[in-house]
Amino acid sequence: MSRLSLYPISSQQTLPIAFHRPALGRRELESVLDCLVREQISQGEITLRLEQSFASSFGYQNVLAVNSLAAAYHLCFLTLNMQKKDHLILSSLAPIAAHDAASYLSVTIHLVDVDKNSFHPSLESILNTASTIREKFGKDSVIFYAAEHSFGSSIPFSFQALNEDGMIVLEDFTGLIGSEKDEGYFGKDTPLSLCGISEYDLMTTGNGALIVASDSRLHKELHSLRYGSKRKPHSVAYDYRMEDFQSAMGLEQLSQLGILINRRKKIGKKYLESLQSTSHETYFQDPKSDSYLKFPIAFQKPFKEVKRYFDSLRIGTSKITEIPLHHLQGLAPLDFPNAERLYQKSFCLPVYPGLTAKNVERVSTSLRGII
């Protein structure tokens, strides 16, 4: 008898649990409709309100809204004066948007594996990679590091050692928008930081991102690079604007963000409790900060078996990423064993705020059933 025949198969009366649903309601619908009625479609007053509201909500100095995470990375790299001869260090599980934006500028990208039993590279591996770059390309090499809080799990080290090493650090706090730490909110530890607000993020405008600048000089430079500012002769700018109807949705999402994050935290903690009685693994370490943007679990069973199990229970799942960056670059998976293991063995479970208590219990029970 196949091991799979022992798994409980859901009846046709059981409704499927979608892997993801954005937290949208009547208020978002009405805000967008109001923009359309007023013919406020392109970027204008409402986008400015979103920028100002986001800044005041978390104590940021300056905020700029753009239409995608790749656009945000690109503008940040340009503002930080990244050039073709420079180098960028990325985790193999970093967003493909960071890789694409650096590729626009033809810089050399260096990938580092995540640490064992972690969603993040170790501080030591980043510093060692920087040292290798300087040995190969010269001690004066300009090195950037894009630090991102994968899956809503906070990076387990400060950026001080990277700064002291001479690296230029850019923080992506997509997974920790509105989450607090001892010094306040995330996104304040680097001159520029950014967060995505796409369909799959903690708050959404459909697609888009927000850039946080620590001072007005950087903010002015970002503005000059994005459409919407007065152009100087012979200047180059990019059509990366966020539209007003998107920003109207973002304002409503921002007003509910605390509720949405608290709901994710409750769901995540429930899953963590269920995992304690299994041999399966996840690597969230900081209950105070972690927001569970995604909830990856490395299962101690073959991929196809796990997939069939969750399909039989009508529970939606997803891979941790569409493609890890070492695959995108055609590098040997054996050189990135920890990221490769997560990619090959992990599934992300539904963790969005709209899950009912009954469905959260169904998912939790499923974790205890596949042992």
Image: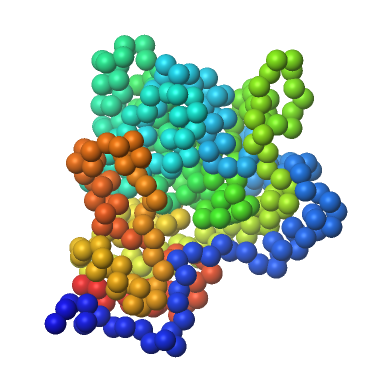
Residue shown at the point (77%, 48%) measured from the top left: 41
Image position, residue 64 (x, y; %): 65, 37
Does residue 337 appear to the left or right of 94 in the view shown? left
Residue shown at the point (63%, 52%) measured from the top left: 205
Nearer the observer, 300 or 121: 300
Q: Work out which residue is located at the far front of the displayed protein and give it.
A: 330
Residue 256 visible in the snapshot: yes
Vertical position of residue 354 compared to residue 199: above or below? below
Image position, residue 4 (x, y; %): 22, 77
Q: Quadrant of residue 88?
A: top left
Q: Quadrant of residue 268?
A: bottom left
Q: Report how many numbered discs are placed on residues in the image.
A: 0
Residue shown at the point (70%, 15%) measured from the top left: 234
Rendered image coloring scheme: rainbow
Image quarter of the N terminus:
bottom left
Image quarter of the C terminus:
bottom left
Q: Work out which residue is located at the far right of the displayed protein and give it.
A: 38
Q: Quadrant of residue 23?
A: bottom right
Residue 167 visible in the snapshot: no
Q: Work out which residue is located at the far left of the displayed protein and give it.
A: 1
Residue shown at the point (43%, 51%) measured from the top left: 152
Does residue 148 appear to the left or right of 213 in the view shown? left
Nearer the observer, 310 or 267: 310
Vertical position of residue 51 compared to residue 105: above or below? below
Does residue 112 appear to the left or right of 224 in the view shown? left
Vertical position of residue 7 compared to residue 96: above or below? below
Image position, residue 348 (x, y; %): 37, 60
Image position, residue 219 (x, y; %): 64, 28
